[in-house]
Image (cartoon, helix red, strand yellow):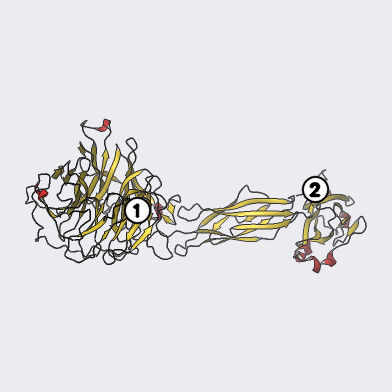
């Protein structure tokens, strides 16, 4: 082909250059005898059947975009706890039905591999620091690596062990080289089953096969079962020197079954797909060429051929594809190939195209994209849960989904990621196929208490409600209630319990000067699997000027042998100058039935005492104590205790001194406990208690 455009034809095109010794040999035509592939079991039903999109940002953090999620449930917004990841892949390492993420990253002295499960259902794995958008996640496995990781993939490399194995390539450090000319190593991990277990947990791994060291650096790695024996083969590409190799993992170690190298026409990328309907998967390859010869190849395993492989498709494209990926966009059992090219900047040439190797009819899928070649990575996945794969491509500042490539190839949905991407690494996978673990949610209401109160007052109770708001996880939550700084002016009871819990909140300004006071009520739980814990409720108290006695309990002792021992005690009253008040003494038996209620001054004016004589003798329900004072602040009440007025045989008595005044909030009441008692000790000092 010429002119830089991709052909819209879906047939293999050949050129005489294919006869060069740099091409895979021999090159028979597409085999017509390969059995058709039965895909009846390819799609699985799930509560969440759509795939998420996972990508690396420019700082090496793994990030998830969940384009479709169940109404009234959380979407997956997971971000890896650390950055610096270089590559990752998606696999079901614990066979729970949803996918996990296997990542490699770090540098020569800090290489590492980790397995993340972004959506978990096991309550025992919940860590309150590992919950993202109400969805708990965990780290299944972590291990250091001997060098700078390059690439990682997963597939079934050992059919004797359930689940996929992991293959990863890393650059060797000098001290770890067996041969000084070696540059990289490929290593393999397989899951370790617990005793008696039939499925892995994804938390324990061991070496799966002998490592292989190489004198070159593999930038591309693909896995797939090319010979239909149930065990995946390993495809490696070094685009720096144009080398392609394919290995089988045999019982006695890896065996190279194919190699092709060309510095002039280097191999660029590889993916394993079922491009031609068949029981066999095939290797789809991109290679560079400016002088003719195919740049898109599809090879299939052919043990009857002297090279072990034959080609089933070849096409010359200029510029060549730099990235090749695959997916089944019409759910018919075979895969389509998708190609990303880098076109000279500014030219309106096709940069994204599809190739279909089946006999089904699909619309032409070719797109020019942005002229700066910004889209450099792609993947496919069922992002809308319709049973067919969508096409996803990524650039630095955008991810695009072609939502119906099988019928409407221009329909797209775009996403602007919250962080710049690395442009190169994107995958899809169903991370929440089984849903996610619903967790109890701690809620404290109201979220704030604001109170104005007069100095000297003790408020009525307010109520704080502590509940579990998640009806999908209705278990009671055990809670503890504390107050920051534990100030004396805030009374909170009870301090512990289980949801639903009602907590009384009272304000004690009896010994507070006018001003503003603040603290926080903190509701915590020792349970790990609880969302939105702790709850913090702000408390703001405004203390206004008001009548404040120097104490709220006055006790007068007398000599049990001498009832003539009269005592006079002075009780200072603090508050705004010229504040008018009234006072009375109430018998203890009547105190409960005469508790004050809030009243506005206009409806209770008769209870007010106007300024009069300098000192007033206040009414008293009991004979053994009297009170006198002016009715305007500042003032001191004189309390006189006379044990001779006690009834015969009575040695102890109690009463209540009630002070009443009015402010802008209405009728205010201050109660002071009074007590008279006899003692045989020589200490007869009266007590004024706070």
Q: Distance between the residues labelled 2 and 1?
A: 74 Å
Q: Which mark is residue 54?
A: 1
Image location (x, y in percent) of residue 402: 31, 61
Viewer-side residue, 414 vs 108:
414
Q: Quadrant where the N terminus lies?
A: bottom left
Viewer-side residue, 367 vs 243:
367
- Residue 598 visible to the viewer: yes
- Residue 621 located left or right of residue 279: right
Choose top left, top right, bottom left or bottom right for residue 213: top left
- Label 2 or label 1, whichever comes before in sequence order: 1
In the rendered image, the vertical position of residue 681 relative to residue 378, given as above or below: above
Element class at badge 2:
strand
Is there a contact, CB below 8 Å, between mark 2 and mark 1?
no
Viewer-side residue, 622 vs 316:
316
- Of badges 2 and 1, the one in the foreground is 1
Image location (x, y in percent) of residue 371: 32, 52
Image location (x, y in percent) of residue 675: 80, 54
């Amino acid at each position: 082909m010429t002119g830089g455009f991709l052909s819209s034809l879906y047939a293999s095109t050949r050129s005489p250059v294919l006869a060069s010794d740099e091409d895979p040999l021999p090159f028979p035509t597409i085999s017509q005898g390969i059995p058709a592939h039965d895909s009846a079991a390819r799609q699985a039903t799930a509560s969440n059947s759509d795939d998420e999109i996972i990508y690396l940002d420019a700082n090496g953090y793994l990030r998830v975009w969940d384009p479709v999620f169940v109404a009234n449930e959380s979407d997956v917004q997971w971000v890896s706890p650390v950055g610096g990841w270089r590559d990752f892949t998606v696999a079901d390492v614990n066979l729970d039905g949803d996918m996990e993420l296997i990542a490699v990253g770090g540098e020569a002295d800090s290489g590492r591999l980790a397995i993340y499960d972004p959506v978990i259902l096991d309550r025992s794995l919940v860590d309150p620091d590992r919950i993202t958008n109400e969805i708990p996640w965990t780290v299944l496995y972590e291990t250091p690596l001997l060098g700078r990781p390059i690439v990682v993939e997963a597939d079934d490399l050992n059919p004797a062990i359930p689940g996929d194995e992991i293959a990863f390539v890393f650059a060797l450090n000098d001290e770890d080289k067996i041969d000084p000319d070696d540059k990289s190593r490929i290593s393999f991990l397989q899951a370790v089953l617990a005793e008696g277990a039939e499925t892995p947990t994804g938390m324990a791994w061991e070496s799966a096969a002998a490592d292989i060291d190489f004198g070159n650096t593999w930038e591309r790695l693909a896995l797939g079962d090319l010979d239909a024996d149930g065990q995946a083969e390993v495809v490696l590409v070094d685009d720096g020197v144009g080398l392609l190799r394919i290995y089988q993992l045999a019982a006695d170690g890896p065996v190279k079954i194919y190699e092709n190298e060309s510095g002039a026409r280097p191999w660029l990328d590889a993916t394993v797909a079922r491009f031609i309907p068949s029981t066999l998967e095939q290797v789809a390859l991109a290679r560079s060429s400016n002088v003719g010869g195919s740049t898109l190849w599809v090879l299939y395993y052919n043990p009857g051929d002297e090279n072990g492989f034959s080609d089933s498709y070849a096409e010359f494209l200029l510029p060549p594809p730099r990235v090749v990926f695959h997916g089944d966009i019409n759910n018919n059992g075979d895969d389509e190939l998708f190609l990303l090219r880098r076109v000279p900047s500014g030219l309106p040439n096709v940069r994204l195209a599809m190739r279909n190797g089946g006999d089904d009819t699909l619309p032409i899928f070719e797109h020019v994209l942005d002229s700066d070649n910004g889209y450099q990575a792609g993947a496919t996945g069922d992002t809308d849960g319709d049973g067919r794969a969508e096409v996803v491509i990524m650039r630095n500042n955008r991810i695009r989904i072609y939502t119906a490539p099988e019928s409407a190839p221009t329909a797209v949905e775009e996403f602007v990621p919250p962080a710049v991407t690395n442009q190169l690494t994107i995958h899809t996978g169903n991370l929440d196929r089984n849903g996610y673990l619903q967790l109890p949610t701690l809620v404290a209401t109201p979220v704030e208490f604001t109170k104005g109160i007069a100095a000297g007052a003790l408020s009525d109770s307010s109520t704080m409600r502590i509940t579990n708001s998640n009806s999908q996880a209705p278990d009671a939550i055990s809670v503890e209630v504390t107050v920051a700084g534990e100030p004396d002016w805030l009374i909170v009871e009870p301090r512990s319990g289980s949801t639903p819990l009602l907590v009384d909140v009272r304000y004690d300004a009896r010994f507070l000067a006018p001003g503003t006071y603040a603290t926080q009520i903190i509701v915590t739980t020792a349970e790990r699997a609880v969302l939105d814990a702790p709850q913090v409720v702000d408390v703001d108290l405004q203390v206004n000027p008001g009548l404040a006695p120097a104490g709220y309990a006055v006790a007068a002792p007398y000599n049990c042998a001498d009832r003539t021992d009269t005592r006079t005690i002075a009780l200072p009253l603090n508050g705004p100058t010229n504040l008018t008040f009234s006072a009375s003494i109430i018998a203890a038996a009547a105190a409960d039935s005469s508790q004050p209620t809030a009243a506005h001054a206009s409806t209770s004016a008769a209870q007010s005492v106007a300024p009069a004589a300098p000192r007033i003798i206040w009414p008293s329900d009991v004979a053994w104590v009297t009170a006198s004072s002016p009715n305007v602040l500042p003032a001191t009440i004189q309390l006189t205790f006379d044990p001779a007025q006690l009834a015969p045989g009575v040695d102890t008595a109690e009463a209540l001194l009630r002070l009443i005044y009015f402010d802008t909030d209405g009728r205010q009441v201050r109660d002071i406990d009074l007590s008279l008692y006899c003692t045989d000790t020589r200490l007869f000092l009266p007590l004024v208690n706070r």
